[in-house]
Image (cartoon, grey):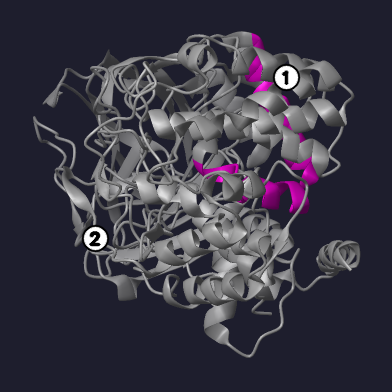
Amino acid sequence: MKKFILLLISGSVYALLATGCKEVGESNNRYVNKWIGTASEGRVAPVASVPFGMMQIGADTRPYGAGYHYQDPTVLGFSHLHKSGGGCADFLDILFMPLPLNHPKGENELYSKQYQAALFHQEEKAEPGYYSVNLYAGQLTVELTASRRCGLQRYRYDTGGEIPVVVDLKYGSESACTIQTEHDVDTVYASAFEWVDSCTIRGYRFSNGWTPRQQVYFYSKFSSPIKACALYVDDQRIKEVSSAEGRNVKALLTFENERSELEVRTALSSVSMEGAAANLQSEIEGKTFEEVRLSASESWSRTLGQIEIETDDPKKKELFYTSLHNVMLYPFLLSDVDNRFRGPDWQIHQTDGFDYYGGVIGFWDTFRAAYPLLAMLNPDVAKDYVKTLLEHYKYAGQLPIWTLWGIENYQMTGIHSLPVIANAYLNGIRGFDTRLALEAMVASAMKDTCGYSMGYFVGLENYKKYGYVPCDMEMESVARTLEYAFDDYALARFAEAIGAHKEAGYFANRSLNYRNVIDPGTLLARGRLADGGWRTPFDPLASSHRRDDYCEGNGWQWTFFVPHDVEGLATLLGGKKALEARLDSLFAMSSELRGENISGDISGLIGQYAHGNEPGHHTIYMYNRVGCPDKTQKYVNRVLTTLYDNTPEGICGNEDTGQMSAWYVFSSLGFYPMDPASGQYELGAPFF
């Protein structure tokens, strides 16, 4: 019966994919509500983009978070790089701000955020691949659309006159995502602006932020000639020149256009200004704004048309297609049209013909469901993503942990490239070098020192020596132990699948290390000292954000992070009935959290189950393994109906690069990859 059910799921999935070939996807675009998650802590931005693109161009209302928040009253400008749906943030590079018509241009000073336009949501419109807003009491309409590497802006004024536009290379994210280096806030260390010809500018912005030494190059062409160009360095106007360099460079451009309309085409690159120019020429040269907008819409139509659902509930349909849209913003393209990219060693490299998706790699969140959904719906993209990981390994000596704009920042715990590669292979994705993959996985899983995080060097030296991470030697020790154990299991599954039996046996045995942090006295995952004792005092409801034995959670929430060996965990706790009782307690107990620095990521609580953060996303489905599928169905339905909503506050935590939405997509369809390195899915409670 079990095999029949799994075959039924498989057949249903392929049937869903088959329906995606029909020309029905366009109607699904209109169900996407790009305001969901833009308020509270959802950190979604209503950017114009295409699936998996580098370009996320959008309105900025604040220089931190996702760059946009629904409750903010003003627009600061329109930047070209966003990380919509991120936890920690960066980007917001290359900001343009059109000013009121005939604005005085003789100022001697120009500051970031100096010009702000009142924002009224009734004047906004957002749909897949497009955004628009009316500013200055209706005097100006700004429209945005995008290709993979290019963003288009169209400014339409209600009367004729001089059009002023600020280009700000100082502005960028002010999010403080790291606490271990001097790069707590995005800081420009070099930038340049050049007026190339009558209709063209180019330049770059180099900054230290969440990612060190981030290099963003741009190339922009205007539909009308530049009449005047005033340049500012360190907020002060400089003499009449056509170029400027420094840490704080801005330009005030003026255009004369009888039609009162101006189009701006901007391409980005991590490689060079010439690379950005080639991207622009290849993707949008000679195309009208409407043609690019239509192409973006059609790309989303194909993506959203891959799954067709039937329901009489418009709210559910809106939530479903918005979620599918948010997942498919990632992976984030980094390579230029010639396949060149700037790698983790800050050097320029070139792939052998595949797309390098190193722009945003946030596997701590996405290995759970977002990547498995990608592998199911877009195997060619998923294959290139695996190749990206292996390319990263060539230049960094290890697989990615958390990468932004091609550079490793070592944030978060675990080495979750391993389950991503295993998931790909077990989903039938081939065409990558499996021997190189095994080499990279083993090297990463054996590396004594991975990088610098949370104020100290981290790696697997202690994990290998003790069989767990001692809490008196490393921070977040319980989370690291549990995650390393799961990653070991993923490596073992991959090794077994490709016939590497020696490696499979070694890492399968090491994957049982989770047992070493399950305290037999409290039956909870708990910090353990190097001498084998347990940390005292112990409060399983306590949280100290990124400064305790867990990672954005507490003892109750992390105890269940053993998706690869539910039966083994049950044995440790006293049997399946005992595990069922512990799960019951998790959902039924008080939602009280204790501590002076409680992690803000612990949200969306049902008892102590925290749906707003990723480590517990599999937990509900563990009920299936203890013979209680009715409880899985009960809590899946509760989460779907109470913790997701089609409002700006409709995500109970931050979107985390598509993972929150991926949980909704899978669970609303009735199945979920509880163990994403197993090749299996758990049944739940389908909506559709």
Does 517 sit left or right of 564 as displayed? left
Quarter of the image where the C terminus is located: bottom right
Front one among 362 and 247: 362
User: Is 373 a magenta residue?
Assistant: yes
Front one among 65 and 368: 368
Residue 32 on image: x %, y %: 55, 69
Tell which residue pokes out farthest to the left in this image.
Answer: 108
Residue in the picture at 66% in, 35% down: 419
Residue 305 on image: x %, y %: 73, 66
Quarter of the image where the N terminus is located: bottom right
In which quadrant of the rendered view does residue 11 lie?
Answer: bottom right
Tell which residue pokes out farthest to the bottom in this image.
Answer: 312
Instruction: Say if residue 277 shows up in the picture.
Output: yes
Q: How many marks?
A: 2
Q: Is residue 245 above or below residue 406?
A: above
Residue in the picture at 52% in, 9% down: 345
Does 13 sit left or right of 339 as displayed? right
Distance from the alpha carbon under mark 2 to that under mark 1: 41 Å
Residue type indicated by callout 1? Tyr
In which quadrant of the rendered view does residue 321 lie?
Answer: bottom right
Q: Which residue is mark 2?
A: 592
Does 583 sit left or right of 531 as displayed? right
Few, some or many C-alpha atoms within 10 Å of disc 2 (few <14, some 14-19, many ≥20)?
A: few
Magenta range is 365-394
Q: Which residue is mark 1?
A: 506
Residue in the picture at 23% in, 17% down: 182
Whichever of labels 2 and 1 marks the residue nearer the N terminus, that label is: 1
Residue type indicated by callout 2? Glu
Tell me the tag on residue 244. none
Front one among 69 and 73: 69
